[in-house]
Image (cartoon, rainbow, N blue to C red):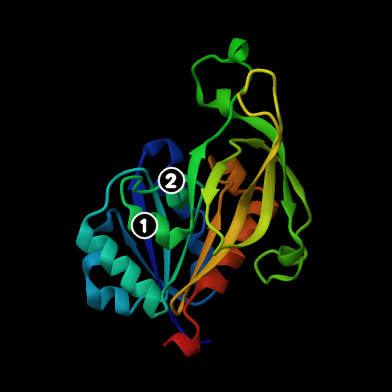
Amino acid sequence: MTRKNALVVRGGWEGHQPVRATELFLPFLRANGYAVRIEESTEVYADADAMAGTDLVVQCVTMSQIGAEELAGLSAAVVAGTGFTGWHGGIADSFRAASDYLHLVGGQFATHPGKEPCERQGVQEDNYLPHTVNITELGRDHPVTAGVGDFELHTEQYWVLHDELIDVLATTTHPTRPWQPWHRPVTCPAVWTRQWGAGRVVVTTPGHSLDVLEHPAVRTIIERGMLWATRTASAS
C-alpha cells in the first residue's frame, strides 16, 4: 500500500465540535495507510512545502476567517492535485468573506430552515427537521455513493447556493411551509464533487452533530469521499 499524507485542519465555531468530529475519522484514515497530521488553524495552508507533500486535506473549520496567503496556498495545492474534503459547516460554511474560497468549493451554506416559529425554544434543535437525502442518477454509479440508498435524517437541512461546475451525487428538497417565504419546493445539492485543476473536492453537507456523522450512510459517504479525493498518481 502506497503511503499517503492526510492533513486534518480543524477549528472555528465550537458548536460543530471540530475536535471530536474529526477524531471520529482518524482511525479510518490510519487504517487505510495515511500518515495523519493535525493542525488547529489554517496557518499550515501558507506552508508551500507542507502542502506540496499533502495528498488529502480534511477540513472542519466553520465560519472563521482565512488569511490571503493561507487561501492562496490551499487553492494552489488543490490545483496541483491535493484532495480537499469535509462535511457540513466545516467546509460548506467556512470563510464567508473569502470569495476565492467559495469559488474553490463550488457551494455555500445559505441557511437551514427551522421549525414553525411557535415551536422554537432558542436551541439548535429549532433547526432540526426530518428530511430525505436522495442519491442522484450520477451518484448511484459514483465511487463515493454507489450502493448507498436514499436515507432519512432529522437534523439541519442545508440550503446551499452553488454553481454548475459541481457534480451532484445527492440532493435534498426543502418543501413549502406556511411560515416560510418561498412558494415552491427547492432542491439543493447535499453531496457533490468538483474537479479543480488536478485536485478533487468532495463536500458532504450532513454532519451537524456526532450522531449524524455516525449515521451509516453519512459516514460511508464521508469516508469514501476521503479516499476518492486523495491525490491520484496522475496528479503527482
Query: Which residue appears at 38% of the width and 48% of the height?
Result: 94
Query: Which residue appears at 49% of the width and 89% of the height?
Result: 234
Q: Residue 102: name its quadrant.
A: bottom left
Is 18 placed left or right of 161 in the picture? left
- Look at the picture and state if 182 lies above or below 37: above
Disc 1, SS? helix
| Mark 2 nearby-residue class (10 Å; few <14, some 14–19, many ≥20) | many
Answer whether labels 2 and 1 touch (C-beta < 8 Å).
no
Residue sticking out furthest to the front: 183
Question: How far apart, in angstroms, are the residues tagged by discs 2 and 1?
Answer: 10 Å
Question: In the rendered image, which residue does mark 1 sit on?
Answer: 101
| Label annotation for residue 93 | 2
Q: Position of residue 161 (x, y in %)?
A: 52, 47
Sequence order check: which comes first, mark 2 or mark 1? 2
Q: Nearer the viewer, residue 137 or 120?
A: 137
Q: Nearer the viewer, residue 219 or 147?
A: 147
Q: Position of residue 26 (x, y in %)?
A: 47, 61
Q: Position of residue 41 (x, y in %)?
A: 27, 54
Query: Which residue appears at 54% of the width and 74% of the height?
Result: 32
Under mark 1, the amino acid is: Tyr
Q: Nearer the viewer, residue 176 or 16?
A: 176
Query: Which residue appears at 75% of the width and 47% of the height?
Result: 151
Under mark 2, the amino acid is: Asp
Disc 2, SS? loop
Residue sticking out furthest to the top: 118
Q: Position of residue 212 (x, y in %)?
A: 61, 43
Viewport quadrant of the C terminus? bottom left
- Look at the picture and state if 9 lies above or below 117: below
